[in-house]
Amino acid sequence: MARNTQVAADHNAPPVTQTLANFVANHPSKGWSEAVEHEAHRTFFNWLGCAVGAAQHESADAALAAVQLLQPAPQASVLGRSTRVDMASAALVNGITSHTFDFDDTHLKTIIHPAGPVASAALALAEHQQRSGRELIDALVLGIDVACRVGNAMYPDHYDRGWHITGSTGTLGAAAACARLLRLNAHQTAMALGIAASQPIGVREQFGTMTKPFHPGAAARAGLMSALLAQQGFTASPRALEAPRGMMQTVSTKNDWREISDQLGERFEIAFNTYKPFACGIVIHPSIDACSQLRARGVRPEQVQRIDLRVHSLVLELTGKKEPADGLQAKFSVYHGCAAGLTFGCAAEEEFADAIVNREDMVALRRKVVATVDDSIAEASVDVTATLTDGSTVHVFVEHAIGSLQNPMTDALLEAKFHGLADPVLGGAQTQSLVSACWALGGAASVQTVVGLARPAA
Amino acid sequence: MARNTQVAADHNAPPVTQTLANFVANHPSKGWSEAVEHEAHRTFFNWLGCAVGAAQHESADAALAAVQLLQPAPQASVLGRSTRVDMASAALVNGITSHTFDFDDTHLKTIIHPAGPVASAALALAEHQQRSGRELIDALVLGIDVACRVGNAMYPDHYDRGWHITGSTGTLGAAAACARLLRLNAHQTAMALGIAASQPIGVREQFGTMTKPFHPGAAARAGLMSALLAQQGFTASPRALEAPRGMMQTVSTKNDWREISDQLGERFEIAFNTYKPFACGIVIHPSIDACSQLRARGVRPEQVQRIDLRVHSLVLELTGKKEPADGLQAKFSVYHGCAAGLTFGCAAEEEFADAIVNREDMVALRRKVVATVDDSIAEASVDVTATLTDGSTVHVFVEHAIGSLQNPMTDALLEAKFHGLADPVLGGAQTQSLVSACWALGGAASVQTVVGLARPAA
């Protein structure tokens, strides 16, 4: 789990993104000297000659062959919609939607959300290539192992530096999964990983915008394309990950190489995956769990005078927003999380709806939450004391929240979560069929059953 | 120009790329415990529920709308071929081909090759959207300004760290150019830059493989898609470049923010672009130029007993390959460069053909070249002394090679270079028409004339 960052940051940087945007949008046409205008023509001219001259090169053949594999579309399904698109676009969109609610999975050692990039790429390719459920599951296990092992090696420096580790390692995981599905040999697979190594995706500044879920989507897309390119003979460095100017040393100053190879093929990182019970950042989960436990013990919002939390500093650093204006902001508010836990006993996506976040009773309740930093409390724990209007107190200590590795979601809880998400889209009956098809996936002759059931009836 | 790197590197990293590739390619299907197998199903199941549940989210609508803009294909031309593909794929392939010969352009202050990512994205979009030459040139100037200004701000730390700065800043330049062509407003343009900021492309370890030219291609593709996403309402952080966990601080530890805004709209970075006279890394250019000058002064290979070079240390660090086995390796051999300069008086792509590199006389001649490091010689200079078989010597000092900012390629030289590249693909007559169309581009009602002339006759 994330620690306080040790990487120096400049918090006073001028707003250069907006400065450049204003310039690009508003600078007048030909608003420069004749010399600049002529240099622009020279630049274009020289570029065009180079492109025409190399048009028949084998790298152009390979790249063109790879992109032409995306035709004819449609090839793969956008999950939960009736739309089908080319497989690379399906990987992108499904990667986005699977992470949109911040409700997916977490490899806790690295806070990678591994399924987003890996499953999104693998399923799109498997659907188009009509692969079996067995092949898909194999690709998923191996792809997630690659992403999480590279993550283990680079964490925490890489994350502290600013990378959204889900996207930056996800490209590699997606490439590995797709290489496996394409039955590439070891050399081709190394080329796929190599091409992917030049495309780490995502910086943490994007948290709270659509570009956060874009990261696993773009990683899925890039990984899939890397495997297709490798299949067509495109080359990369066989030391693209580890070389001095390879990906890992470029995006992380500390790498523990043993994390890649130790117990490879014996210990599988997917075994350490966890699933979010609550649709928000994982550091709030202990507090929501604790307040849900208060509710289970009979405490009701109207009885509460004050709720005291003792939390690790990281909780307030990441989720200390006191007055969230909408659902997205509420996902970064431990105060709203507590109010939801106590009021509803849960915090799925609907408990983060704008209307809920701004409901008068919710606003009042979250203002009764007082959070105090206490670094003797682990990041994964919380100590909660509710003081009731009659002066009595109720105390809950959560060491490991529901959904953690030590206190995992049961299959039944996962099913309930799935129904909560899918019933409104697919209807309860079709969702139930989809649930059954998913558990049987490893033995399915094709992935088409699952894909078909994930499409809403017309 | 590049300096010696100051970033520590681990030169003894184990071959983890190949280790992971072997594992992914060869690990047996279901080669793990039942617990792992079940966890894989839980991972897939949980991921699928999240994707279905968010399928109707506005971010999915925006992403889907953007990818659907790539349909129906074909939309844009692969230059120098008769193939047309979707505009994003055209941006990718043209970005690759334009950099394949290492023969394109260089913004010397940052060693960015700016046209590859920017022009490849802009022309593909302009062709599909039937924009004027004026709009294309405007987009090119502004997009290159964005890429090079961000490069100025991050160089050299960013490059020393391992990034191929052409791809990492190129995504931003391509996004800016496409935002301009799409006539996005300043807010949308900031979103386009923001989405692009999560997709820096390319590490230097890839030099010498197809993934090097892939970098400008992938950057072109990512920039174009970022602009399309922004147009469809996709959001990113408005401080995605400069924030503490934004792109620039994540990929560079030193940023000079003034490089972004100083004289913005007055000084245009495209004015500092240069064009390669020789199809190889720029640090060899002074040596090739010097040996071409020896030839012009009457020195012939068979007269030469020995050629002494005094060069900056970077020249041998980057291009010190003594016995190149093929054309690609020869591009990193100052020894072959000298042999080509003396033998042919030039070093275009054909002088780097495998057959030329392995020709007996070329091998013999390059072995007569003795390079000595002398850091009193600037990186852009060389001091060459040829000792002839009669004992006499001929001396050439090149301060600024042809193609440098101080000694630029003339328009006539650019045209000769263009013909050398394009004549074999398009024929001399069509190439001449294309040359004329390029110089007239800024006044052209449409980019179609140039695009059409860059397509070989059937």
Image (tube, coloured by chain):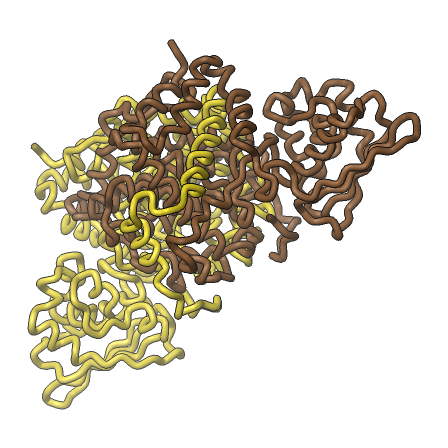
Chain colours: A yellow, B brown
Residue reaching furthest to the front = A34
Q: Is residue B361 above or below residue B336?
A: above
Instruction: Look at the image and tell me in which quarter the N terminus of chain A lies.
Output: bottom left
User: Residue A308's x, y, as percent?
Assistant: 24, 81
- Asked whether, in this view, residue B381 is left or right of residue B67, the answer is right
Task: Please report the residue visible at 27 percent of the width from the left and 46 percent of the height from the top.
Answer: A96
Instruction: Look at the image and tell me in which quarter the C terminus of chain A lies.
Output: top left
- Residue B95 can be seen in this image: yes
Task: Please report the residue visible at 34 percent of the width from the left and 63 percent of the height from the top.
Answer: A15
Task: Please report the residue visible at 17 percent of the width from the left and 83 percent of the height from the top.
Answer: A306
- Pick the residue in front: A160 or B342: B342
Q: Is residue B84 above or below residue A199?
A: above
- Pick the residue in front: A446 or A357: A357
- Pick the residue in front: A345 or B95: B95
- Asked whether, in this view, residue B243 is left or right of residue B203, the answer is left
Residue reaching furthest to the right = B391
Residue reaching furthest to the bottom = A391
User: Residue A171's x, y, as percent?
Assistant: 41, 43
User: Residue B83's x, y, as percent?
Assistant: 36, 19
Q: Is residue B442 above or below residue A270?
A: above
User: Residue A289's x, y, as percent?
Assistant: 23, 68
- Asked whether, in this view, residue B143 is left or right of residue A58, the answer is left
- Pick the residue in front: A93 or B456: B456
- Residue A110 can be seen in this image: no
- The answer to which image quadrant residue A307 occupies is bottom left
Q: Is residue A399 above or below residue B305?
A: below
Mark count: 0
